Image (cartoon, coloured by chain):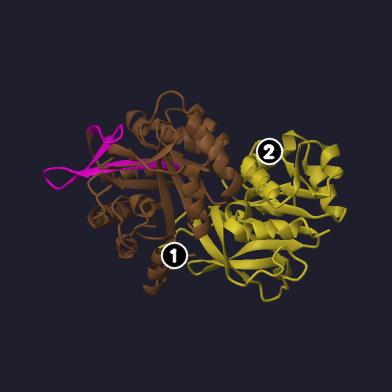
Amino acid sequence: MSPKRLIARLDIKGNRLVKGIHLEGWRSLPKHPNEYCYDYYIQGIDEIIYVDAVASLYNRDSLKEIIRKTTENVFIPITVGGGIRSVEDAYDILRSGADKVAICSQAVKTPELISEVANKFGNQCMVLSIQAKKDMNGNYEVWYDVARERTQMDVMEWARKGELLGAGEILLTSIDAEGMEKGVDIDLIRQVSQVVSIPVIASGGLSVAGDFVEAVNAGADAVAVAKAFHYGRVTVAQIKEKANLMGINIR
Amino acid sequence: MAKEVSIIDYGMSNLLSICRAFEHIGARVKIVGTEEDILSADYLVLPGVGAFPDGIKELGKRNLVEPIKQFARNGKPLLGICLGMQMLLGKSYEHVETNGLDIIGGEVNALPRDMKGYKVPNINWHSAEENKTGDWKNTIFENTENGTCYYFVHSYYAMPKEEKHILANSQFGDLKFASAVKKDNVSGTQFHPEKSGEDGLKLLKKFIELL
């Protein structure tokens, strides 16, 4: 089995770390985002994902400042998403110190942006962020604009198309599981992992170390943890220990 | 006095991350892009993110190919990272066959896409194992524990012609590939030490202690 990655996801609003439920109703956490990030780094996290929670159109200076500060004492890969609408936006974020960009809404609106970013900076730099929600018939539908707009597009079709257009990874967020702390969406992870050959990062719902194992067994190459880390419900060490115990190859 | 590390800027790398990492371990960083600066460097780093043909083209456009080769011959430490490491070799088959700097003999080939459970691009942490012919003493891996993990992002891998130029191996499914190379004063890592946490920083620190 290939090695699996454990990622800390930090949703940012202004200069605060926030956490919501189903990507809504954001609440601020007490410490500065950079403090959480450094803490996870010291604990041995494999990667960091920052997401601009409100995908702010203007005034992204605070986010860039957070990225810039991160590069001073955190030496692992950093992915940044939320509100990236053009190759220029992507360049701006990468220049601030990000290693990869995650694009969601604008990829839905203009899918060719995936190819443009991949061609300009390499596939490894282009993370397609997919917000998925189960519809009434039990099919997974792509949503966007921070889970406010629906597309009637099938998640598996969109994931496949994203790969063809040049995405190097998929950040798969389950809107249903997000913030609920009731476990990951196994079904969603399994279905998406089966239709693409690029790495899939499962995001949303992890509350105990065993959820990491479940996500990996369903096909995830990496798992992003947010709330459970921020509120101290589970630690990096606990998850890695559990993964090791279950025979998962992890740093 | 702080050691000065010269990092080549040819428009194709995560320059900021590499600078931050060297600064963090106490080095002074100088961004270089001319023959004069390269030849007067003490420690030279050739970074790189992107495709092999583009990398060579950009170096060529800036007339940096010969100065880098000359620097390599003068015996001072040179470190290639990721694409920068691959370009140290003779040639690559990424997109089209392209000649490299040929400082270390060998070629660069595509990672196999039929390794079950292993995906391309390979975006992952892999352990680096000491090559059986090698010895990590007086290398960037000195005092590193065998099997330490580093962060990789790549779709191609280096195949040095001579076994003795392989410093470390990593495993991609059934494929054992060179994750670090070394020939005399020239070293290279397929992984990103600047993105591999404290273990990566340790390698960079060793690098600036090589002289």
Mark 2 — on which chain does it sit? B
Q: Amino acid at mark 1?
A: Ala
Question: What is the crowding at mark 1: few (fewer than 14 residues within 10 Å), some, or many (at least 20)?
Answer: few
Position of B25 with respect to A218 (left or right) is right
Q: Residue furthest front?
A: A30
Q: Nearer the viewer, mark 1 or mark 2?
A: 1
State which chain is coloured yellow.
B
Q: Residues within 10 Å of mark 2 (few under 14, many from 20)?
A: some
- Verify whether residue A136 appears in magenta: yes
- Tell me the residue at 77%/55% (across/down): B208
Tag count: 2
B3 or A93, nearer to the observer: B3
Quick check: A61 above or below A196?
Answer: above
Q: Give the percent coordinates (x, y) of residue A216.
A: 34, 62
* Percent position of residue B198, x then y: 60, 58
Q: Secondary structure at mark 1?
A: helix
**Could you tell me which chain the residue with mark 1 belongs to?**
A
Using the image as rendered, state which of residue B156 and residue B144 is in the foreground. B144
Secondary structure at badge 2 equals: helix
Q: Which residue is mark 1?
A: A237
Q: Is residue B128 left or right of residue B77?
A: left
Which chain gets the brown colouring? A
Residue B199, quarter of picture: bottom right
Q: Which disc is residue B57 wearing? A: 2
Residue A121, can we see it?
no
Whole-number angstrom distance, CA of label 1 to CA of label 2: 45 Å
Q: Amino acid at mark 2?
A: Lys
Which residues make up the magenta segment?
A126-150
